[in-house]
Image (spheres, rainbow, N blue to C red):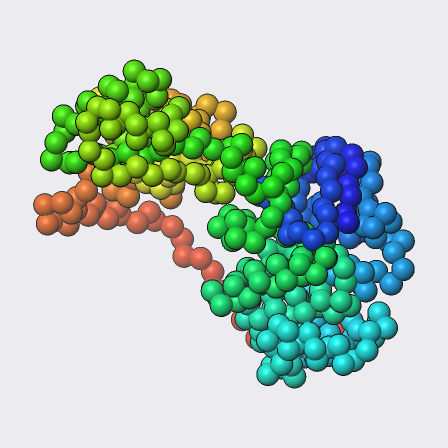
Amino acid sequence: MIEAVGLTKRYGDKTAVYNLSFQVRPGTVTGFLGPNGSGKSTTMRMILGLDNPTSGTVTIGGYPYRKLPNAPRQVGALLDAKAVHGGRSARNHLLSLAQLSGIPARRVDEVLGVVGLQDVAKKRSKGFSLGMGQRLGIAAALLGDPQVLLFDEPVNGLDPEGILWVRNLMKALAAEGRTVFVSSHLMSEMALTADHLIVIGRGQLLSDMSVTDFISANSADFARVRTPDTEPQLREKLTSALTEAGGHVLPEQDGALRVTGLPLPRISDLAHAADVRLWELSPHQASLEEAYMRMTQGAVDYRSTVDQKAGLQQPLPPGAQPPMPVPGQGQAGWYAPPPPQQGGRPVPGQAPAAGPYGAQPGPYGAPQGHPGAPGAPNPYAQGQAPAMPAAAPAPAVAPAPAPADLTKTQPEDDAR
């Protein structure tokens, strides 16, 4: 079992992990989720003794990693699949790790077969693809047959068959009673692999619960109801009946109704009592991705702003065109990034508040009014080339002296 208590890590003025406490229990696959920069990799490095915590403790089976006897036989990890000597073959890489830990050589061939690299065991790893490198990293983690395993993005670069293999491998390892801790950004894969979730944001714990409980706690379940499209009056009739019964009804773009606040049997009874035929009555539960986005929307450090093409697109003047509706605006979980001039990071090429382009130079240094500047008239629009300015007479300047012949030996060189 992995246990962290009050784990904190600071790098100068930056706090990567703050007061983080959790347990990773054996027998289940525990997913480790969080936005970029949330502290997942730092936490895993502290678990493995690669970084020292500023405060707090993290133990494996009750001991810090560095005090575990023959740690590679108790803990296996994949943090960076590229951490391999490219000049060594896959087999020699694993063999060197086995010899350092007192693992018999026959185990090397076993794990090569487990990860499917037995046919390329004698090839140098520098020629491996990203997916092959991931398989080699997983083989190194399994080398000592450990009871605790940590994987950081284990399916990165794998094809669908490889992703399915990793999924089944994680479940099989957990079924054997091992502790499996997996960090990933693929929500769909985590939903199929993990039994428990630990979610952090900006270095702090956000959630520590099962996948089912996490989705239920961070999503709004609703029912989809559809009446015959040829009879719109039935939809209006059903909407009134559901609203009077305390339900909340919202129309969807495809003509269906989204109903919250009423269970499915109650919706069916109300429709029957109102003599309304139903074409659809189905429950909707949010996916892990939807629940994750709702949970972590306030802990994301890197957000996209509107792409202004580095200042190459002239913004429309106010009132020139009515604003387009934003899908999802006003609904729960909707987020609109602030304009860059309101405290956000400046967008490259964006002009200051004095005006969209004002008297500033263009994106490539051309002043306003130059044919290459944004918003300048195009001289080629009428199919004619612009008139070239008359050449100015060259000023009377004395001819420059001819450069010295550097191939001739200078007196200083002769003296040397």
The percent position of residue 367, horizontal first and vertical second, equals: 33, 36
Residue sitting at x 19%, y 27%: 275
User: Camera-side residue: 279 or 140?
Assistant: 279
Is 225 on the left-hand or right-hand side of 288? left
| Residue drawn at the location 44% of the way across and 57% of the way down | 400
- Asked where in the image residue 239 lies, by quadrant, the reply is top left
Taking depth in this image into account, of 96 and 376 the one nearest to the observer is 96
**Residue at 59%, 83% in the rendered image:** 119
Q: In the rendering, at what x and y percent does residue 146 appear?
A: 77, 63
**Quadrant, the C terminus:** bottom right
User: Going by the image, does 181 lie left or right of 324?
Assistant: right
Question: In this rendering, is residue 399 above or below 289?
Answer: below
* Vertical arrangement, residue 244 with respect to residue 162, above or below: above
> Residue, x 43% and y 38% (percent of image)?
285
Q: Is residue 103 visible?
A: yes
Residue 185 in the image: state x and y as whole percent. Answer: 54, 49
